[in-house]
Each structure stands twice: as structure tokens, then as C-alpha cells.
Amino acid sequence: MGNQYEKKYNDLRDCLRQMHERNTKRTRTALRSLLIIPTIFLVMLFFTNSSKTIFLVLWIVSMFIIASVLIVIEYQDFTLRKMIADVEGDEVLEEIDSPDREQKFEYDNYDEAPAETEDK
């Protein structure tokens, strides 16, 4: 029985790692397309004699679409890394910069520091 759980745990961990690797490849592809596609529209803008407004609109729209795809990929990967951290323990959580983690904040201005009450 314990061997089955260990096998399922290892399968889950491997699946999460593979999904993370796929997200990394998707991010690289989206970044390349962010460079290539708008460049193609800009080249077409300068070398054709048609309406320049259309190419400018296509250039701007393509950048927004690719940027939104990148945002979605990064959010999915962030959620996936949190799931990996939950499965493997807190050691992976240290690699993730998440707003959930408590960070030690030191005041650089004495007036902003909370007042400490001393009970005597």
C-alpha cells in the first residue's frame, strides 16, 4: 500500500516538473515571437505603400496579445511552482518570490516604527 502512494507521489512530482519545463519553453517561444512578429509588421510598414495606420494597429495589437499570453503563462507557472512547493515541502518555496511569504521588514525611519508598549 505504501509503495502505491510513493509511486503516485513520484508520478505527481514528475508531472509537475514536466509542466514547469513546458511552461519555460512556452515562455521562451512567446518572448521570441514578441521580438519577431512586431518586427515583421514594422518592416512591412516601411516597405509597403499601403496604409501605415493598419500596420501600426497590427503592430500594437500583436504586442498586446503576446504580452497577455506571457502574463497567462507566467501566472500558470507561478501557481505550478506553488503546487510543487506544497508537494515537495518548504525547500522549493525558498526559490519562489511570492507575496505570501513573510519577509522581514525593517523601518528606516524611527517615526514609522510601531510603538512598543512596555508593561511594568
Image (spheres, rainbow, N blue to C red):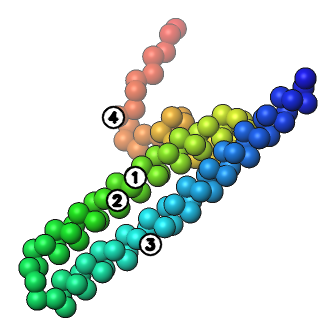
Q: Earlier in the sequence, mark 4 or mark 3?
A: 3
Give the amino acid type for the residue marked by disc 4 in the picture. Asp
Residue topped by disc 3:
32
Query: SS class of the residue under badge 1?
Result: helix
Which sits in the foreground, 9 or 101?
Answer: 9
Q: Nearer the viewer, mark 1 or mark 4?
A: 1
Q: In the rendered image, which quarter is residue 43 located in?
A: bottom left
Give the amino acid type for the residue marked by disc 2 in the picture. Ala
Which sits in the foreground, 9 or 91?
Answer: 9
**3D distance between C-alphas at marks 1 and 4:** 39 Å
Give the amino acid type for the residue marked by disc 1 in the picture. Ile
| Label drawn at residue 111 | 4
Residue topped by disc 2:
67
Query: SS class of the residue under badge 3?
Result: helix
| Label drawn at residue 36 | none
Mark 1 in CB contact with mark 2 (< 8 angstroms): yes
Please state the horizontal and vertical placement of residue 20, each as a whole percent of the image: 61, 52
Please state the horizontal and vertical placement of residue 113, each as a whole percent of the image: 40, 32
* Left or right placement of residue 73 versus residue 110 in this view: right
Within 10 Å of disc 1 (Cα), the crowding (few <14, some 14-19, many 20+) is few
Mark 4 in CB contact with mark 3 (< 8 angstroms): no
Residue topped by disc 1:
71
Q: Earlier in the sequence, mark 1 or mark 3?
A: 3
